[in-house]
Image (cartoon, helix red, strand yellow):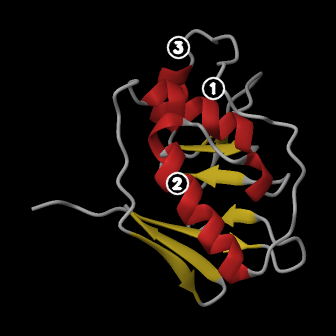
Amino acid sequence: MRGLTAALLAAHVTTGMLAPVRRSRRVRVVAAASEEDYVNPVTEFLGRFIPKQAPLELGVDWDRTKTPLPLGDLAQALDRGLRANEWFVTGRVLPELFADDFKFEDPDVSLTGIRNYAEGVARLFGEDARCEVIACAPRGEDIAVDW
């Protein structure tokens, strides 16, 4: 049986940009001299042993103009972009869809900025990683992505 992962993204009502829905209630440990904000102290400790790497070239136009979109249009743009670029595993995001204060958080790490997220994802998965989008649609004021 194939498992589905759901990602919830909230559209900023005033900006029309994407930001993830924060659901964590964990205490965070901030790593000194690092851009990462670790939620899990074990991950923070192990992260000290990973050498810092130069920025990746992902073929992303980081300077594209951000255009606020209504929720339905934003969901459609997100769906098209995820299907074309599979950025959940490649890091090849469409930065024009994301708020400047975009923050990603999972049980182990929290990152601020879509570029930091994209580079982290690209380093995490191999070049042959694939992402199949099952559904991407508004759910209340959020956008839910099943993949």
In the image, farthest residue toward the left: 1
- Quarter of the figure with the N terminus: bottom left
In the image, farthest residue toward the bottom: 140
Separation (CA) of disc 1 from disc 3: 21 Å
Q: Which residue is mark 3?
A: 50
For the residue pair 65 and 111, the one nearer the viewer reads as 65
**Amino acid type, residue under disc 2 in the picture:** Leu
Separation (CA) of disc 3 from disc 2: 29 Å
Residue 46 in sight in this render: yes
Measured as percent of width and height from the top left, residue 35 is found at 74, 31
Q: Which residue is mark 1?
A: 58
Q: In the rendered structure, which disc, 3 or 2, sits on the residue that comes first in sequence?
A: 3
As helix, strand or loop, the secondary structure at mark 1 comes to: loop
In the rendered view, would you say 140 is above or below 23?
below
For the residue pair 4 and 29, the one nearer the viewer reads as 4
Packing grade of label 1 (10 A; few <14, some 14-19, many >=20) is: some
Residue 21 in sight in this render: no
